[in-house]
Amino acid sequence: MVRPHSDPDVRWFTVAEAAALMKVDKATVLRLIHSGELPAIRVGRAMRIPEQAIRDYLKNHHPTSHAAPVEQPQDPPTA
């Protein structure tokens, strides 16, 4: 796992968010983290994955070798 950066511009994703972006199951993301293939940090009991790690993984493991664009999660609409 990587150490947290002090860079405020680093975007961190939860396992569920990373799974949705990568179009895989949460268990797959956890397996990639535990195998060392996807860098992450532990925050309490939760895991956080830096956006660049997701981009790098997709770039290096996507069948066409092109990283899919990382979409920003949408905030729920306020009433």
Image (cartoon, rainbow, N blue to C red):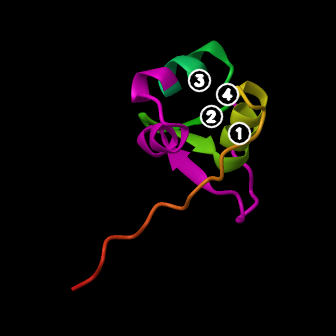
Dot 2, how many residues are within 10 Å of its Cα: few (below 14), some (14-19), or many (20+)? many
- Type of the residue with mark 1: Ala
Q: What mark, if any, has residue 53 been given in the picture?
A: 1
Q: Secondary structure at mark 3?
A: helix
* Mark closer to the chain start, 1 or 2: 2
In contact (CB < 8 Å): disc 2 and disc 3: yes
Q: Amino acid at mark 4?
A: Met
Residue farthest along the left direction in this orientation: 79
* Residue annotated with mark 3: 33
Tell which circle, 2 or 3, labels the residue nearer the N-terminal end. Answer: 3
In the rendered structure, does residue 26 fall within the stretch colored magenta? yes
Which quadrant of the rendered structure holds the C terminus?
bottom left
Q: Is residue 17 left or right of residue 36?
A: left
The answer to the question of whether label 3 and label 4 lie on touching residues, with beta carbons closer than 8 A, is: yes
Per the image, the residue denoted by label 2 is 40
Q: Is residue 3 visible?
A: no
Report the magenta residues as a range: 1-28
Q: Position of residue 15 (x, y in %)?
A: 46, 37
Q: Amino acid at mark 3?
A: Ile
Q: Which is more N-terminal, label 2 or label 4? A: 4
Q: Residue at x 47, y 60 (%)?
A: 73
Q: Nearer the viewer, mark 4 or mark 1?
A: 1
Alpha-carbon span between mark 3 and mark 4: 8 Å
Q: CA distance from mark 1 to mark 2?
A: 8 Å
Q: Are marks 1 and 2 in contact (CB under 8 Å)?
A: yes
Residue drawn at point x = 70 percent, y = 26 percent: 63
Answer whether residue 15 is magenta in the image. Answer: yes
Residue 61 occupies quadrant: top right
- Residue type for callout 2: Ala
Would residue 71 be visible to someone looking at this image?
A: yes
